[in-house]
């Protein structure tokens, strides 16, 4: 694993942010803004994160975008931000704009049927508590299960889901705490590529994530922005920087806001 950087890379990025006077902040939710919880509806953000994000959004100069495997509708109440940020749900299959406009990628009939069958299999086998149906996928959550039960559940579901994925043209992916069937061609890297295409070439962009599903985004941002791994322990990753939540995460948000504030003060003095 390459050595993850901290102060030097971060300081250079923050200087650039202050010079340009605006930036794009891309954020995963679970494991990044909020600690993992077996009860998914109770995965609330670390103390201080909501206030930091609210200040960024209202202060201007920052395009805040949340990119998550969760459906966009499930993120809104957890974020509790007004005005709401831009949200890409289901790994990018959904896009919810700050003005409320909603977009869902087209889904073919075979994919829809396959997702329905995969969901029904979980329900028929008493796994309702571990099932998360989504507009463009379905997830099996095994976080919090004893090891032997996790192995039993995974052993039961995996072969059936692999067969459904093959027949319906779906993608079967693992994540930290479960497995997911989703439509192909959807991942956080595609979202980052789309957002970069919408940005000015000199606009500083950072993505903060923790999970294996965030590696696509780290790779897409390589050479163009700052990729940040947010975890209590490091792991092999394409990210450049490692932050330990919540203290270092909150410090990152503070540095971001201060960089933009210095830029505004300088602009006022020069004006």
Image (cartoon, rainbow, N blue to C red):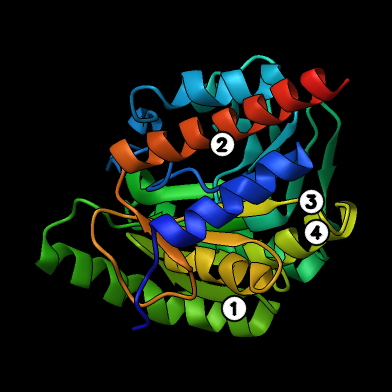
Disc 3 or 2, which lies upstream in sequence?
3
Q: How would you rate the neighbour count of disc 2 (Cα within 10 Å): few for under 14, some for 14-19, many for 20 or more?
A: many
Q: Residue at x 28, y 77 (%)?
A: 155
Q: Which residue is tagged 3? A: 203
Q: Which residue is tagged 1? A: 165
Q: CA distance from mark 1 to mark 4?
A: 31 Å
Dot 3 and dot 2 residues touching (CB under 8 Å): no
Relative image position of residue 248 (x, y in whole percent): 34, 42
Q: Which mark is residue 201?
A: none
Q: How would you rate the neighbour count of disc 1 (Cα within 10 Å): few for under 14, some for 14-19, many for 20 or more?
A: many
Q: Residue at x 28, y 66 (%)?
A: 234
Q: For this view, does 89 lie left or right of residue 20?
A: left
Quadrant of the frame with the C terminus: top right
- Judging depth in this view, the residue of 143 and 84 nearest the camera is 84
Q: Which residue is tagged 2? A: 256
Mark 4, secondary structure of its residue: helix
Quadrant of the frame with the N terminus: bottom left
The part of the image, by quadrant, that contains residue 74 is top right
Please tell me whether residue 81 is drawn above or below residue 205 in the rendered image. above
Relative image position of residue 101 (x, y in whole percent): 86, 31
Disc 3 or 4, which lies upstream in sequence?
4
* Nearest-to-viewer mark from 1 and 2: 2
Q: Which mark is residue 196?
A: 4
Disc 1 or 2, which lies upstream in sequence?
1
The part of the image, by quadrant, that contains residue 65 is top right
Q: CA distance from mark 1 to mark 3?
A: 39 Å
């Amino acid at each position: 694993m390459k050595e993850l950087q901290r102060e030097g890379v971060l300081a250079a990025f923050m200087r650039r942010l202050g010079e340009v006077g605006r930036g794009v902040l891309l954020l995963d939710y679970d494991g990044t803004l909020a600690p993992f919880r077996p009860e998914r509806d109770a995965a609330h953000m670390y103390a201080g994160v909501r206030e930091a994000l609210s200040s960024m959004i209202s202060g201007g100069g920052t395009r805040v975008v949340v990119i998550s495997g969760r459906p966009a509708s499930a993120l809104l109440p957890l974020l509790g931000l007004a005005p709401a940020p831009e949200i890409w749900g289901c790994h990018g299959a959904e896009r919810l704009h700050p003005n409320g406009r909603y977009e869902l990628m087209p889904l073919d009939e075979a994919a829809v049927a396959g997702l329905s069958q995969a969901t029904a299999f979980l329900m028929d086998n008493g796994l309702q508590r571990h099932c998360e149906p989504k507009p463009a996928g379905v997830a099996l959550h095994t976080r919090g299960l004893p090891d032997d039960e996790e192995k039993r559940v995974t052993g039961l579901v995996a072969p059936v889901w692999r067969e459904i994925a093959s027949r319906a043209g779906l993608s079967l992916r693992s994540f930290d705490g479960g497995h997911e069937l989703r439509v192909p061609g959807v991942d956080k890297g595609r979202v980052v590529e789309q957002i970069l295409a919408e940005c000015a070439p000199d606009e500083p962009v950072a993505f903060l994530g923790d999970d294996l599903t965030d590696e696509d985004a780290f790779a897409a941002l390589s050479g163009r922005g700052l990729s940040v791994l947010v975890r209590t322990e490091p792991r092999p990753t394409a990210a450049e920087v490692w932050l330990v939540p919540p203290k270092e995460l909150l410090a990152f948000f503070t540095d971001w806001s201060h960089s933009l504030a210095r830029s505004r003060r300088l602009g006022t003095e020069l004006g």
